[in-house]
Amino acid sequence: MSSPALEAFLARLYAEEAALARFLDDPDAVLAASGLDPAERAALGVIDRAGLVMAAHSFAAKRSGRAKPRPAGRVRRALATLFR
Amino acid sequence: MRQLSAGDRFGFGWRPELAAGILAHLDRVDVVELIAEDHFGAGRTALRALRTLSAQLPVLLHGVALGLASTVPVETRRLDRMARLIEAIGPESWSEHLAFTRGGGVEIGHLAAPPRSAASVEGACRNLDAARRITGSLPSVENIATLIDPPASTMGEAAWIDAIIRGSGALLLLDLHNLYANAVNFGQDPRQLLRRLPLDRVGMVHLSGGHWIEGPMGARRLLDDHIHDVPPEVFELLTELGRLAPQPLTIIIERDGHYPGFAHLLAQLDAARAALALGRQAAAA
């Protein structure tokens, strides 16, 4: 049980705060409108809710970290210094 | 790419903060691992420096964003970019994660565990074959840590990893802290989980640390964060791996922040050598 549609649904839960809030508030309604097949909807109906919230927060923190200056420049500067 | 050398090797993930320490201790650091995405935009001078680095000591390339464990085919342009970097730097080998990182046009921003199922096994094997065709070499694949029990899964973690490793022919980059975190977070015995993995296919090992976080409904889980020391439990798993897997292993310590003095990191590397040696000795006894 896995499909591009299921991965897209999970990606939205993991990355979009509003989508996660809607799902946590009323999972049945969100799943009914999801277009996923019955087996996928049933599996998501018993999702690990605590894990979902913790994972989404962790992903948000990662994205926030990426918004800071990319390390690539620091990597290149370090290399340029070392191998000048 | 250069051939793998014989014998166990120990090194660090290459980070700017660690560069001086690594280069000052090449007598104790056998190998370094570069994050591929840090260098996709590198100019000729920087790439020349990286090639110089790879001439000084073995360099491994590590991707973090391809999202190979997906039912969606990996985009050719992403693999083309990896192929160009491999060509420019000349690493000994490269690796990626058993994760999906996007879906339906939405970027998750990090490594997410897909539903563990026959469909994602098939998708991962198809994507790994595409990676091999486009880059010229098959990446090793790494088990990831997850804070959520992957929904809609029909397979356990070990069986799922085993199916991908057997189906694709890839080597396993075994992250022992990821294994440990998943085991303690989802009620499994870490040693038993280790033994169920395809240990004969392990070529590389990642070691790192993490910390416990609190969640809703009283949930408490171990987050793999790469900013803490490798815990004793993970060194014990390395000893067990050394006992069970006789092939040469490349051990990389990953540290992404809260950097201690380099002497402290060298002590962690020494602890890894000692832990693996203990397992080797137990196997020989």
Image (spheres, coloured by chain):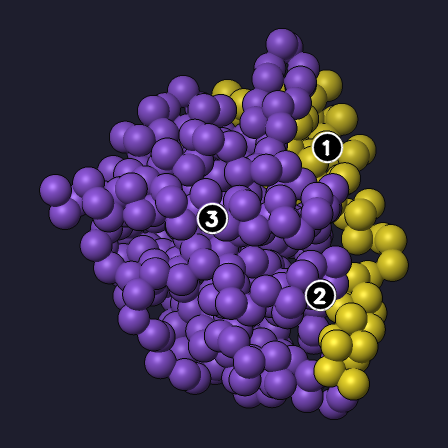
Colour yellow maps to chain = A
Q: Are marks 2 and 3 on the same chain?
A: yes
In the image as oriented, which residue stretches furthest toward the left? B285
Q: Position of residue A79 (x, y in %)?
A: 74, 75
Circles 2 and 3, Cβ within 8 Å, touching? The answer is no
Badge 1: chain ID: A
Relative to residue B5, is residue B182 drawn left or right?
right
Label 3 SS = helix
Which residue is the site of mark 1? A57
Vertical relation: B98 (above or below) B183: below
Quadrant for the N terminus of chain A in the image: top left
Label 2 SS = helix
Q: Position of residue B124 (x, y in %)?
A: 41, 59
Residue B45: name its quadrant: bottom right
Which residue is the site of mark 2? B20
Residue B152: name its quadrant: top left
Q: Position of residue A21 (x, y in %)?
A: 76, 26
Report the front residue among A23 and A83: A83
Vertical relation: B156 (above or below) B19: above
Report the front residue among B130 and B259: B259
Relative to residue B108, is residue B132 drawn left or right?
left
Which residue is the site of mark 3? B270
Q: Position of residue A57 (x, y in %)?
A: 72, 32
Alpha carbon distance from label 1 to label 3: 35 Å
Report the front residue among B90 and A39: B90
Circles 1 and 2, Cβ within 8 Å, touching? The answer is no
Q: Residue at the spot x=50%, y=21% of the render?
A: A46
Q: Residue at the spot x=43%, y=55% of the render?
A: B251
